[in-house]
Amino acid sequence: MFANIETPALILDAAKVGRNCARMRERVLGHGVVLRPHVKTAKSVEVTQLALGAPHGAITVSTLREAEYFFDHGFRDILYAVGMVAAKVARVAALERRGARVSTIVDSVEAACALVEASRKENVRIPTMVEMDSDGHRSGIAPGDERLFAVADALGDSLLGVMTHAGGSYNCDSTAAIRQAAAREREAVVNAAAALRTRGHACSVVSVGSTPTATFADSFAGVTEVRTGVYMFHDLVMAGLGVCALEDIGISVLASVIGHQREKNWVLVDAGWTALSRDHGTAKQKVDQGYGLVCDAWGSPVDELIVVEANQEHGIVARRDGGVVDFARYPIGTRLRILPNHACATASQHCEYKVIRDGRIAETWDRFGGW
């Protein structure tokens, strides 16, 4: 079915992605919470519409290029979920004047004051959330830190609410640990919102989000929205966490066998790190998938093969156990599909999806990049 597809190519299984999206919608909406999909991985109108189950809706972005692109395609309610700086206010203001509702995040008094001042100069008010650090993973204000109130005061009537991202959940070693991470994530923002309200601040949005915690959280009480993104595709890291099965992974990289190194038991393919990325996110998991799990053209894992090394345009494929490769099964020109460690990193290497429906390439969906 891939005879006319040049490799490497990013393959999207529409049925799998559709099922992944439907499951997350059912879970989140079933709790009476808004699902605000994170579209940084998808970077595609068609994928985002699958995620929402609708032509338009509330979304989360990581770049202003994403915000502009999705606004141009009819999306109006957009959260820019990366710490805001004054130099970017003009672009947000331009979107606001065109009819967008773009909200932003900050985690310091300095950033809040700069945002408010730059917004005043642009004659706009940008709704802004205070980012909380629920697990020491990245940015944000730690629970119980009094700086929360100073940031809220600096934002004044621009304060929209509080948000957090439990990125540490990607390092959990059990479902029970993910549930605990989800509880900490929820408590961090729910308690912060309550504290702000006791100080007289309106706090209408309480936002959480990561695919592992959204999948296994026992409660969303006090939360108003869930942001999550990689669930649309899933990947080997998610499979290693028990968030999905290998059969749920909805994207793969199609590659061609271009050579054999028989004395090394290597099969060479034309998908290196420019097609797969350098992400090695499964290295600390129970099963190390190298730079990707190798499947046959139909998407089934074969011979315990993984990509053990990735050069710029060459992938080196070998058995996970270092054993002998049956080269007769992989003549030059054979098409293989490689499941990604990290869907976000792999997708970012490509400008389009080749979409499979009913076992054949049905269409091509554009995918964009840049900031």
Image (spheres, rainbow, N blue to C red):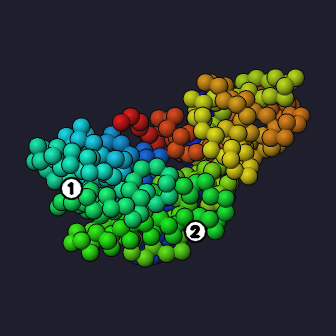
Asked if residue 62 can be seen in this view, the reply is: yes
Q: Which residue is drawn at 33% across and 73% down?
A: 194
Q: Is residue 14 visible?
A: no
Q: In this view, does 110 lie to the left or right of 191?
A: left
Closer to the N terminus: mark 1 or mark 2?
1
Task: Determine which of the numbered discs, if any, sits on residue 179 in the image.
Answer: 2
Element under disc 1: helix
Rendered image quadrant of residue 204: bottom left
Q: Which of 300 and 176 is in front in this view?
A: 176
Bin the neighbour count of mark 2 within 10 Å (Cα to Cα): few under 14, some 14-19, many 20 and up: many
Q: Is residue 111 left or right of residue 279?
A: left
Residue drawn at x 11%, y 43% is 121
Disc number lying in front (1 or 2) = 1
Q: Where is residue 33 in the image (x, y as percent from the top left)?
A: 40, 71
Residue named by callout 1: 154
Q: In this view, does 295 lie above or below 286?
A: above
Disc 2 residue type?
A: Arg
- Tell which of 40 and 71 is nearer to you: 40
Give the residue type that dot 1 points to.
Ala
- Locate residue 215 relative to residue 226 in the image: left or right: right
Q: Position of residue 237 (x, y in %)?
A: 63, 50
Q: Where is residue 209 in the image (x, y as percent from the top left)?
A: 45, 60
Report how far apart the C-alphas of labels 1 and 2 lie in the structure: 34 Å
- The residue tagged with tag 2: helix, strand or loop? helix
Q: In which quarter of the image is the N terminus?
A: top right
What crowding class fits label 1: few (fewer than 14 Cα within 10 Å), some (14-19), or many (20 or more)? some
